Amino acid sequence: MKIGFVSKPECPKCAEVIRFLSNFLTENGHDFVVELGTSKDLKMDGERIEKIKADAIVTVGGDGTALWTIQKTKLPVLPVNVSSLAFLAEADSRTALECLNKFLRGDYKIEERARIKTTVNSKRLPDSLNEAVLKTMIISKIRWFGIYLDDDFIHNIRADGIIIASPTGSTSYSLSVGGPILDPKVKAFIISYMAPFSLSARSMVVPSQSTIRAVALDKGRNIMLTLDGQEGIEVGFHDEISFTESEYPARFIRFNSDFYKNTREKMS
């Protein structure tokens, strides 16, 4: 088998884990390749992630490393956590070798997680696993947003921003503004509001097969659309932004993952 490695940038502990795992692969007759940025930290030859051909990608870092990798490749991902908090991780530095060995033996399953497809004026942007966020670029300046679900008008609202979250992202940014936690198997998205200027504004759970549309109603621009905290573009007056479920789910390598046990441990 061939394994790809992606590391959190400038993380000595991550590099140490990758060296250990790559040595194990070589000693047991398997191959590996490291992502180009990761190769600089390891002082090895590397490959652009979009060009990596492997059976799986092992990400070493935190959720940010896994999210970046998932935006760049359709290969299954095994996230290894060396950070303080990582909801996506299947292993840590102590259990990484055991999990990699299970994968090599075929003792694993693939879990698919829904991702959000985002378009701006019909132009498709990279899919996001956690959330898409529309927010003001000016401190202390709230904006008007119009929100629609398919052909139904929901409301116009003034707020610092709007969060469209997947079930995976329900434990991320949306949770911090009071949104609900969704089981990853639920086919739904969450619409949450950042500092809304309304006593009646509450998070909404909507079907993921529907299309959520958001329109910036204030003239000018000064609104940023970010996807999983990785990609960002400026949008403005009457640009039409739409969100629906992507046809390309994220794929994770799992062993005995328990969503509720993981959530209890991370939230405690």
Image (cartoon, helix red, strand yellow):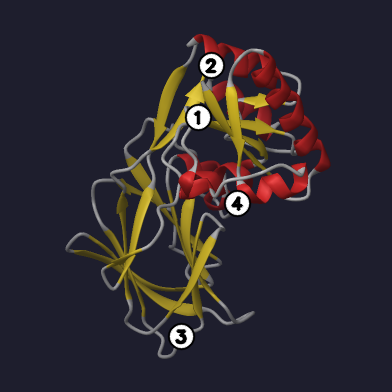
- Amino acid marked by disc 3: Arg
Which residue lies under the disc numbered 4?
Answer: 176
Mark number for residue 56?
A: 1
Which structural element holds mark 3?
loop
Going from N to C along the chain, the mark reached first, 1 or 4, is: 1
Of badges 1 and 3, the one in the foreground is 1
Quickly name the residue at label 2: 103
Nearest the eye: 239 or 49: 49
Q: Which residue is drawn at 26% across and 69% down?
A: 122
Asked if the residues shown at circle 3 and circle 4 are in contact, with their CB atoms under 8 angstroms apart, the answer is no
| Whether residue 161 can be seen here | yes
Q: Which of marks 1 and 2 is nearer the N terminus?
A: 1
Q: In the picture, residue 88 is in which quadrant?
A: top right
Q: Within 10 Å of the Cα at label 2, are there few (<14), some (14-19), or many (20+) other Cα atoms?
A: some
Foreground of the two, 94 or 238: 94
Reading the chain from its start, which is encountered first: label 1 or label 3? Answer: 1
- Please report contact status of discs 3 and 2: CB closer than 8 Å, yes or no: no
Q: Residue at x 41, y 57 (%)?
A: 126
Instruction: Determine if residue 180 is in view.
Output: no
Q: How far apart are marks 3 and 4 (CA)?
A: 26 Å
Q: Tell me where residue 47 appears, x and y as whole percent.
A: 57, 46
Residue 178 horizontal side relative to residue 39, left or right: left
Q: Give the spatial CA distance, label 1 vs label 2.
A: 9 Å
Q: Identity of the amino acid at label 1?
A: Ala
Observer-side mark, 2 or 4, equals 2
Which amino acid lies under the numbered mark 2 shown in the image of this protein?
Answer: Phe
The amino acid type found where label 4 is placed reads Ser
First in residue order: circle 3 vs circle 4: 4
> What secondary structure is marked by label 1?
strand
Left or right, 46 with reference to 54: right
Could you tell me if the residues under marks 1 and 4 are in contact, i.e. CB atoms within 8 Å? no
